[in-house]
Amino acid sequence: MTASVVTATGLSRFYEVGGGLLSKPREIRALSEVSFAIPRGKTLAVVGESGCGKSTLARVVTMIEPPTAGHFAIEGTEITPDQWEAHRDAVQIVFQDPYGSLNPRQRISAILSEPLKINRPEMSRAEREAKVREVMGLVGLRPEFYDRYPHMFSGGQRQRIAVARALMLEPKVLVLDEPVSALDLSVQSQILNLLLDLQERLGLTYLFISHDLSVVRHVCDEIMVMYLGRAVETGTKEAVFGNPRHPYTRALLSATPVADPKSQKERIKLSGELPSPLNIPPGCPFAARCWKVQDRCRAERPALDGDGHKVACFFPEGE
């Protein structure tokens, strides 16, 4: 069995908001008790609506923010805040916006060499330049781009620069936070194929965050579906797409476009309001929008349970 590169157990991240002289601050549970393991060279896709906790998970795994509770480990070594500096180069992130993630006042050579200056101070200037040029070639950037500024590139080229920057420290894990959602469809396919090629060549492990299930189907090995900060269904790509068991997962898949005009698919339109993360109701958080809801759902919170294909639902689809 392939060893897991990243292992998370019960990861949670809470924020306090508001509060004052006469009132206590309220708590937002942006991420609650999320657990997963990603084997080497594989991709775990995290999907769900905006506000479900996907990007919060990305910030915790990349050590941008500390978890409020829970643990995560890289290659069996548990990572705590006092160890972050020693392990930051093991996990790198590619952000959603290829325009906002690059400094417009720096040349590409400076943007790509900066991680080496900070984390590899022993490298000479010539060694840094050689490394930058090597990684540029790896992601399909021509040598003459070395001294150009970000505004001189297209969106797809800028995202290639962002991927190159993430690869400079030779990480074991890449967190991809909506890496193609800001790009045109034709460019999306180029970047996705680049990521798949890099994964095969370098043995990278991906945590791929997206709301686009058609993209996820193309790149992932396993899927974790999140709702209001919690995982509600996990399993292999084949299991989740072929037999979605949570009503929320089924609703998401029903809204995914299919490139077949003859395909007949029933669209599930969710009714009810999305609960506020400041006031998540007891029981199943999806109960207010679920067409299978019963009294038990409003009173008890279902655990994520199952053999391989796990679901947090008392009355899952197919039963």
Image (spheres, rainbow, N blue to C red):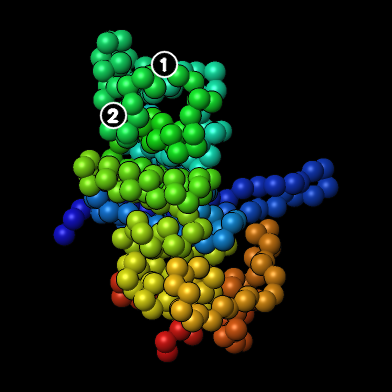
**Residue at the far left in the pictured view:** 1
Residue ID for mark 2 = 137
Q: Which mark is residue 147?
A: 1
Q: Is residue 155 left or right of residue 174?
A: right
Where residue 7 appears, as percent x and y from the top left, is 32, 52
Badge 1 amino acid: Asp
Where residue 274 appears, as percent x and y from the top left, is 66, 67
Q: Tell me which residue sits at (38%, 63%) in the image.
A: 217
**Residue at the far bottom in the pictured view:** 319
**Residue at the far right in the pictured view:** 22
Badge 2 amino acid: Gly
Q: Is residue 272 above or below residue 224?
A: below
Task: Give the secondary structure at mark 1.
Answer: helix
Q: Is residue 156 above or below residue 230?
A: above
Q: Tell me which residue sits at (33%, 48%) in the image.
A: 193
Task: Give the secondary structure at mark 2.
Answer: helix
**Closest to the observer: 1 or 45?**
45
Where residue 270 appears, as percent x and y from the top left, is 63, 75
**Closest to the observer: 147 or 200?**
147
Where residue 128 appears, as percent x and y from the top left, is 30, 16
Q: Of label 1 and label 2, which has the lower sequence position?
A: 2
Q: Is residue 67 left or right of residue 217?
A: right
Measure the alpha-carbon separation of dots 1 and 2: 14 Å
Q: Could you tell me which quadrant the C terminus lies in?
A: bottom left
Instruction: Examine the rendering and report whether any part of residue 73 can be seen.
Output: no
**Residue at the far top in the pictured view:** 125
Residue 116: which quarter of the image? top left
